[in-house]
Image (spheres, rainbow, N blue to C red):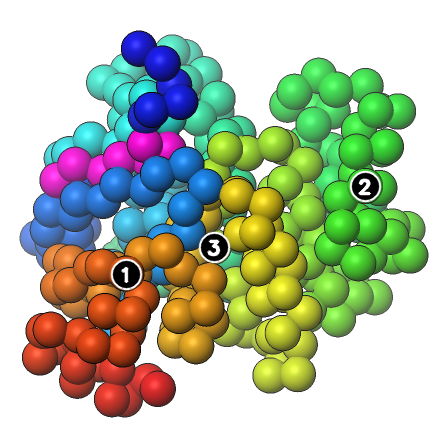
């Protein structure tokens, strides 16, 4: 089995419930290597839960999650479970709406701590790689700044660089720009577009339809725990077939 032909992410019949509330009702998705998939849909439709299921922050109750040919939600327990989950999580970078940088660490240290502590990279090597990543997101001059001294857009760019420092196979973005002042959104979107151009595989939950139209290879419209419609952005965003997609887009464009 060659890994080159595997989808990077494959979801089969993902279900998740909290008590009696079924939040994901059977989600199927294939994300090929280097592709960008955007997930849109009303608040409460299950978008965040889906991303949190993929990296096992909310393990699904049913279905399969495959990452590059490896089953993510294996029926393991105890130490074996922890080891497996930590390993797969390292392969998935995640950027949240809230800036969740370590406040007591500088921008540079935020990037180096993961590779040093979790991957055994030497501090010197981690620093070289972190400086490259900070330069890539336009923040080389902020290496020694603490998060409190950074703007929201800068914090989010550090968060992206920190995720990249772990050399993930896929990046998961959950409304990465929705807590930002409008004038700071573009600088973060630019970094995401740059990653897209470099063929990073990305799943992007967003409420910015224009951004989704620009970067996505594929768009998924979710409502009430189900995929209502999916397809290329020209179809789902410009020419939706389903009445519920049309109605959502009328409110969000
Ligand atoms: P979205 O990101 O599309 O707004 P979410 O995935 O955050 O939607 O939430 C989907 C539904 O699941 C909502 O009704 C939410 O209240 C519920 N939910 C999400 N997380 C939990 C949880 N940990 N416990 C109970 N209910 C939850
Ligand atoms: Mg959400």
Q: Say which residue label 2 marks.
A: 132
Mark 1, mark 2: which one is toward the viewer?
Answer: 1
Mark 3, mark 1: which one is toward the viewer?
Answer: 1
Quadrant of picture, ligand 1? bottom left
Callout 3 touching callout 2 (CB < 8 Å): no
Disc assigned to residue 173:
3
Packing grade of label 2 (10 A; few <14, some 14-19, many >=20) is: some
Disc assigned to residue 232:
1
Packing grade of label 3 (10 A; few <14, some 14-19, many >=20) is: many
Q: Is residue 83 left or right of residue 148?
A: left
Q: Is residue 211 visible?
A: yes
Quadrant hosting residue 213: bottom left
Image coordinates of residue 87 in percent, x first then y, are 48, 22
Q: Which residues are magenta?
A: 7-13
Image coordinates of residue 217 in percent, x first then y, are 37, 55
Front-most of residues 20 and 12: 12
| Dot 1 or dot 2, earlier in sequence | 2
Front-most of residues 115 and 76: 115
Under circle 3, the secondary element is strand
Q: Is residue 100 left or right of residue 49?
A: right
């Amino acid at each position: 089995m060659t890994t080159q032909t595997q989808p990077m992410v494959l979801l089969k019949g993902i279900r998740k419930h909290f008590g009696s509330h079924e939040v994901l009702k059977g989600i199927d998705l294939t994300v090929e290597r280097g592709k960008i998939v955007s997930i849109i849909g009303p608040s409460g439709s299950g978008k965040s839960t889906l991303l949190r299921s993929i990296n096992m922050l909310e393990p699904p109750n049913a279905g399969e999650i495959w990452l590059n040919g490896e089953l993510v939600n294996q029926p393991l327990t105890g130490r074996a479970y922890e080891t497996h989950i930590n390993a797969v999580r390292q392969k998935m970078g995640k950027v949240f709406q809230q800036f969740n940088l370590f406040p007591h660490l500088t921008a540079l240290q935020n990037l180096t701590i993961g590779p040093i502590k979790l991957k055994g990279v030497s501090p010197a090597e981690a620093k070289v790689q972190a400086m490259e990543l900070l330069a890539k997101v336009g923040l080389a001059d902020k290496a020694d700044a603490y998060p409190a001294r950074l703007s929201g857009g800068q914090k989010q760019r550090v968060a992206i660089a920190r995720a990249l420092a772990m050399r993930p196979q896929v990046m998961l973005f959950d409304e990465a720009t929705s807590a930002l002042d409008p004038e700071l959104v573009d600088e973060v979107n630019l970094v995401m577009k740059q990653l897209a151009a470099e063929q990073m595989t990305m799943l992007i939950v967003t409420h910015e339809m224009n951004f989704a139209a620009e970067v996505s290879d594929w768009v998924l419209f979710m409502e009430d725990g189900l995929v209502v419609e999916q397809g290329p952005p020209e179809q789902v965003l410009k020419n939706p077939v389903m009445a519920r997609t049309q109605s959502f887009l009328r409110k969000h464009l």
